[in-house]
Image (cartoon, coloured by chain):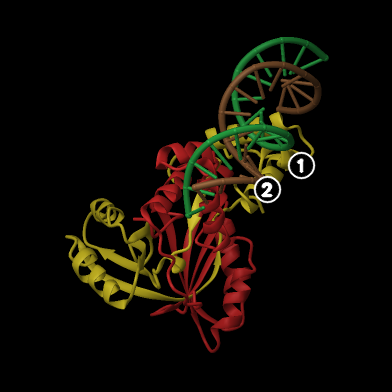
Chain colours: A red, B yellow, C green, D brown
Amino acid sequence: MSPISKPAQLDDVSKAIIEQLQADGRRSYAEIGKAVGLSEAAVRQRVQKLTDSGVMQVVAVTDPMQLGFYRQAMIGVRVTGDTTEVSERLASIPAVDYVVLTAGSFDILAEVVCENDQDLIELLNKEIRSIPGVQSTETFVYLKLQKQFYNWGTR
Amino acid sequence: MSPISKPAQLDDVSKAIIEQLQADGRRSYAEIGKAVGLSEAAVRQRVQKLTDSGVMQVVAVTDPMQLGFYRQAMIGVRVTGDTTEVSERLASIPAVDYVVLTAGSFDILAEVVCENDQDLIELLNKEIRSIPGVQSTETFVYLKLQKQFYNWGTR
DNA sequence: AGTGAAACGACCGTAGA
DNA sequence: TCTACGGTCGTTTCACT
């Protein structure tokens, strides 16, 4: 989040290529080329550049619900003292899939995935609230995921 | 989030295939096959099944920072009355990339991406706090993203 | 940065265990 | 659900613009 370099300036063709891969990350370069009006080789070079520069990556994403993780929640964490160690401890917990240091009435926001309520309770008590420096937590149990983007920027 | 079907039971081979695609979504079936000890056709069939059933998808993910969106924040929203319409309105805003209905001291959590602070202020005032039913908001500006998973479950 | 062509490798359908 | 195999299509390299 901190490294401020210049934003990558993408032309419409690169944006179109990204959109193609957002729809289906395994679409062939040839097919993308047809869609965006470029040769296969040119598409491949652009994709290479986009991934090498870190603007884009193509990855598999799995659905927690389909895998039996029926309980998701965001945990707002208030910390006494330095937040660094607490956030690292949180990030090291497998059930925690998202950790961000924030400014506001929470110092850290952490998203967690659990199989059920019992797991969530234990996660909170045994793994999160027991971390030294964690002063208090507030839990927001997910009821319905309304929108989720893995992709930003090309809008 | 609501449709509760049985969790997909994945054997070690399917988990290994998913891990391969989490590392690189464009890895060839043949190469994955070598890594997991399966023929190319078998890998292809499994990937097909995983994507058809919605357990997994392969997509392009872009980095907002690299695209000039230097300000991210989570907005906690308190709503008077029905939360459905508010969440739909929020989800329709391009700068909002994540919306979830929650139980707790917020009714909705929404993640936003902006280019700078000015954009965030305007987003809040003109697009979010102006939605009928939005009683109050609390903003958690992101300072440092510590951990981000696009994938869960295979742990 | 882009195209085009030829060799190579991946992908897909089908058949069979 | 897997392997095997042939036809088709995608990818790679390279020479050229």
Q: Read off the residue under disc 2.
A: B20
In three-dimensional space, the C-alpha distance between marks 1 and 2, rounded to whole angstroms, equals: 9 Å
Mark positioned earlier in the residue sequence (1 or 2): 2
**Does residue A86 appear to the left or right of B38 in the view shown?**
left
Q: Residue at x 44, y 66 (%)?
A: A8
**Does residue B26 appear to the left or right of A21 in the view shown?**
right
Compared with residue A31, is residue A44 higher up or lower down, i.e. above or below? below
- Considering depth in this image, is B122 or A81 the residue closer to the camera? B122
Name the spot of residue A80 as percent of width and height, x first.
Answer: 52, 87
Compared with residue D9, is residue B146 higher up or lower down, i.e. above or below? below
- Label 2 near label 1: C-beta < 8 Å? yes
Residues at discs 1 and 2 both on one chain: yes
Q: Amino acid at mark 2?
A: Gln
Q: Disc number at residue A99?
A: none
- Considering depth in this image, is A33 or C2 the residue closer to the camera? C2
Chain letter for the residue marked with disc 2 in the picture? B
Q: Secondary structure at mark 2?
A: helix
